[in-house]
Amino acid sequence: MTALLAELTRAAVASRAPQAVAVVPVGACEQHGPHLPLGTDLMVAEHLALAAASRLAGSLDVIVAPGVAVGYSPHHVPIGATLTAGAATLLAQLRDVCAGLAAAGFGRVFLLNGHGGNAELVVVAAREAGQALRVTVGAGSYWVMAWDELVAAGAQDRGRLPGHAGAFETSLALALRPDLVDAPPHRPGSSFVRNPAGYWGRYHVERPDAMAQGDGFSDDPSAGSAADGRRYLEAATGAVAGALREFAGQV
């Protein structure tokens, strides 16, 4: 039985939707250093959604909607090779997707985010859609949902978590699509993004040159490996599956 919404017939959706959780992967199409594909964030989010659906099969029906491929990425535009939606545009798209799923019979929708720039917006979209549509909408960024599991798997040992196109994301891409990964540079990334009091610190600081300082990546990508990536994906899959099970129980 497929977990992909796009592969289902109208009748199958009508039959499964009332008992299912619809998961919407949300990503980006933006530069990921000189070595990773632009769609890395969506690729990871879609993989985790499908892997979690497979893990939950038999106990919870998870149906994965088509991913949102263009996210909020203005901070990457100066480096090049980046598509971005405005904040209002992305919010409107996410609300519309949730509305379509609600109209199709889903009472539970989860926005699974794979891109740091979307983190606040998916939560706002969930709040607005849930109130407007009178359905239960959840939202989370996979690395937050799986933080403890990823740290236990060593994801902080080689660089920033999640960082950007550094050791962590390079490992994920090598595990998922090594054919799309060029030789990673062997050098540190942006000192600003690596600073715990900066980009992923206790508060947010926005500097237009933050990513450009490090050629579009946050920490040394050459520290990543496919073996690490497989370990991180396994850890994240378990955490995302657990979160979806918990979310489903709140209705």
Image (tube, grey):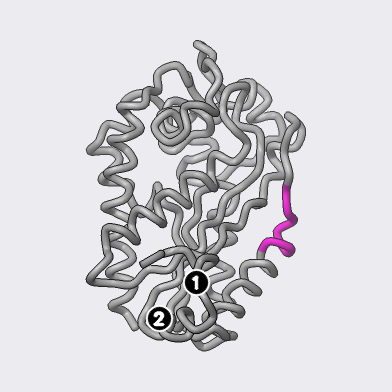
213 vs 77, nearest the viewer: 77
For label 1, the residue is 8
Decide: is 102 above or below 69: below
Among the 4 quarters of the image, the one containing residue 229: top left
Image quarter (top left, top right, bottom left or bottom right) of the C terminus: bottom left
Instruction: Give me the residue at 59% from left, 85% from top.
Output: 132
Q: Which mark is residue 248?
A: none
Residue at 37% x, 23% y: name it.
225
Q: Nearer the viewer, residue 206 or 105?
A: 105
Query: In front: 8, or 229?
Result: 8
Q: x, y percentage for residue 171?
A: 41, 29
Is residue 138 rendered magenta in the image?
no
Farthest residue, direction top: 186
> In which quadrant is the N terminus drawn?
bottom left
Q: Is residue 245 left or right of residue 127?
A: left
Q: Amino acid at mark 1?
A: Leu
The image position of residue 110, as x and y in percent, is 45, 68
Q: Earlier in the sequence, mark 1 or mark 2?
A: 1
Q: Amino acid at mark 2?
A: Arg
Q: Is residue 132 above or below residue 237?
A: below
Q: Is residue 207 shown above or below 148?
A: above
Q: What span is in magenta? A: 84-90
SS label for mark 2? helix
CB under 8 Å between discs 1 and 2: yes
Q: Where is mark 2, residue-wise?
A: 16
CA neighbours of label 1 inside 10 A, class few (<14), some (14 to 19), many (20+)? some
